[in-house]
Structures are given as structure tokens and as C-alpha cells.
Amino acid sequence: MNRTPRMPRSARGAAAVEMALCLLILVPVFLYSLFLDDLLRYSLDAQETALSTAWDFTVQDYSQKLPQAGTKSKPFGGLTVVQKQARLMFCDHESGIDSFQLKPYLDEDGKPTQGYPDCKEADHHQAAAAHVCWLNPHAKQVTCEAPEQAAAALGDPLHGSFQDAFTHGGLIRCSARAVVENYLLPKRFLQEFSKVELTKEHWKGQGTQIHDNSEKGDESTAYFLKEQQLAILTDTWAVSTPANVRPGQRYTPPGPSEQSPARTVFAQLSHVYTRNEPFRELTRTVNGFLGNAAQGQLLAPDLRNLADDPLKPNLAIAPQTSDDPSEKIQQERRSASYFNTEWRDWDKDHHPQIYRRRHAGYLGCKPGEGC
């Protein structure tokens, strides 16, 4: 009768040691790969939060002050509407899935209120290995500083006065920092072979809910991701609504708070026209010329109010609606045609060439299509 030979006791002991060593290496590597996958994804989400919010400031109308958000809404929006909307979008730490609809909740006093599920509920904490949160005292929900106007200053008095009167942009900094806690890796594994702790803290089973744990984590028990930052120098110096000013129209130079595009364009033109050294010389020359003409009876005093005042700028501007940006202007009892943009130079005509290539798209990109 044949019997299978038994493995010597020493060989069985060596196999057990090899198995333990394999477990000591393979299991932590597998668990760590899951944990690092979540950690990397959270780091990229935090990076997206700060960077994309900063770029949102490039499309604001800086002829007006940035709209401010109330601080009573949860989460606190603070400062600008841009920041508040970004915080609502990234309440659940990413921008891919948003509810966009309010739901009824109870506030801290037990009174009915409304809020976004992305901010109120914790169902987004479903990662396999780690949970990320903004609520930790060391975390920072996306925060953007007020525009630093001095960063865009050129040191020229005329530029500075124009910037103070009509533009509200500058250097804008946005930053965000997330805190991650481990819910998968055991803190200790096979301690008979190794005394090294695998993770800072294992939070599963602790606390009443994930958000409570997120507020308790510190540097010894949680992972503080690197703060993500981006700064953008932005100020469009543009009138966002097309202006339409007819020749001969007169406007009293308005203040920056007036919303009419035509009046805003005229105010900007008048500001530059009247606040420079050549204008001061023009003022002295014109007043002297008109005074001498009236004194020499070459100009009737009543006619001074009817003629164009050289000390006040004239402006004509209209939106371009065709490939021939011209208009008819009545003068000297007849109709004359003028280009209302820098359209024709009768040489290379760069403006019409660019317009025809661009058409209605931006930089040659047709609406609704890629470039």
C-alpha cells in the first residue's frame, strides 16, 4: 500500500513562514493601492476646485463691482457670488454630479428650511477606502480673495485714475484644501511579524456619522492634502453690452454706476480725453481763441453754444451687424457713408480678413463645434 510522503516538519514551518511573509507584503500592498487611489482622486478634485473657480472670474463684468453673496446661506458663500456658487458645486468635493434642486430640511433650530442635497447629505461619502471632507478645522473650502487692483497698475496717473473709476478687476487668488480620513486600512497588521503601523487612524465604527469624524481629525489621525492655489490677473476693460451711439448725440459724463452701455462708453472716452496734459493745453488754447474771436467781433457770442465744443468729445459707435460696417450720416444737406469701425485701410485690410475668417465664432471656432 502506497502512502503519500509527509512533508517534514521543518519544511512545513518554512512554508508557513513564507505564507506569512507573502501576506505581510501582498495584503498591505493591495489595501494601500485602494487607499492611494482614493487619495489621488481627492487630491485632483481639490485641485479642480481651486483652479476652475479662479478661471470663473475671467468671465465677470469688471465695469461693475463683483456681485457679493450673503453669508447666511450654508455653506457660507462669503465674498462673491462666484465663490458661493463654486462652494455649492463642490459641496460633495467634485463637479461631475450635482443635484441643482433644493430639498426641504430642518435647520439647527429645528425650523423648516431648504438646501442642496450635495451639501446637506452624506451619501457622497461612499468611497471604498477613504473619505474626504471640507468640515475639518484644518481644511479650507474654496476661498477667493478680493481683486488686488494694485497688481494691474502701470504707474501712470491716467491709467490709475481710469482703473479707479471704471474697472474693478486685478489679481485674484483662489485656494482649497481637503482633509482625508482612512476607513479601510487596518492600523496594525500581523503585529507578530511587524511593529509598523500602516495608517494614522482607522475611523470605521467611530463616531455617530462621517461628518462628526471629519471634524475631529488632526495631523496624527488624518491626511491633510496639500493646499491648492491659483492666481489670475483678470480685468476685461470691456463693455459687456454693445453700445449704440449716434453721431451728434450728447451725454453728460456719467458716473461709473450708470448702467447704460452708451453712457459708459462715453464716460470712458471723456475720462481719457479730459484727464491728460495735452487737454490742459487745449483748454487754454480754445478758451483764448474763442475769447479773441468774440472780442474781435469775428464770432457772435450766441453761436458759441451752437457749435461743437472742442473741449467735449464726440462719439459715434454701433454694433457690427454685417460684412460692411458702414452707416449713412446726414451732413451738408446730403447723405455720406462712413465706416463705423477700423475696417478699411485700403492696403491689406486686416480687420475684414480677420472678421470673415472668424465669422460668428471665437478665434475661428464655429458655435457648437470644436476647433
Image: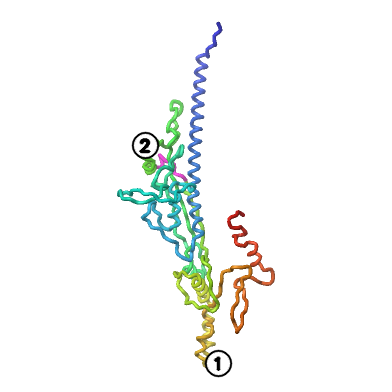
Q: Residue 367: name its quadrant.
A: bottom right
Decide which of tag 2 and tag 1 comes sooner along the chain: 2
Q: At which x and y percent is residue 209? A: 37, 40
Tell me, yes or no, whether the highlighted magenta stretch contains residue 223: yes
Left or right: residue 242 compared with residue 352: left
**Residue ID at (48%, 54%):** 53
For the record, the magenta segment spans: 218-225
Q: At which x and y percent is residue 215? A: 37, 44
Q: Residue 333: name its quadrant.
A: bottom right
User: Which element type, helix, strand or loop, lies under badge 2?
Assistant: loop
- Residue 135 drawn above or below residue 299: above
Q: What is the number of the mark on residue 209?
A: none
Most extreme residue toward the top, as rendered? 1
Most extreme residue toward the right, as rendered? 347
**Residue ID at (50%, 90%):** 302
Q: Is the magenta stretch mostly helix, strand or loop?
A: loop
Can residue 150 be seen in this snapshot?
A: no
Can residue 251 be seen in this snapshot?
A: yes
- Residue 44 drawn above or below residue 308: above
Q: Which amino acid does label 2 sit on?
A: Gln
Q: Distance between the residues labelled 2 and 1?
A: 96 Å
Q: Badge 2: few (under 14), some or many (20 or more) residues near its Cα, within 10 Å?
A: few
**Residue ID at (53%, 68%):** 242
Residue highlighted by disc 2: 206
Tell me, yes or no, whether the highlighted magenta stretch contains residue 345: no
**Residue ID at (50%, 22%):** 17
Task: Out of 185 and 13, give the one closest to the viewer.
Answer: 185
- Residue 171 drawn above or below residue 293: above
Q: At which x and y percent is residue 77? A: 40, 54
Q: What is the number of the mark on residue 298?
A: 1
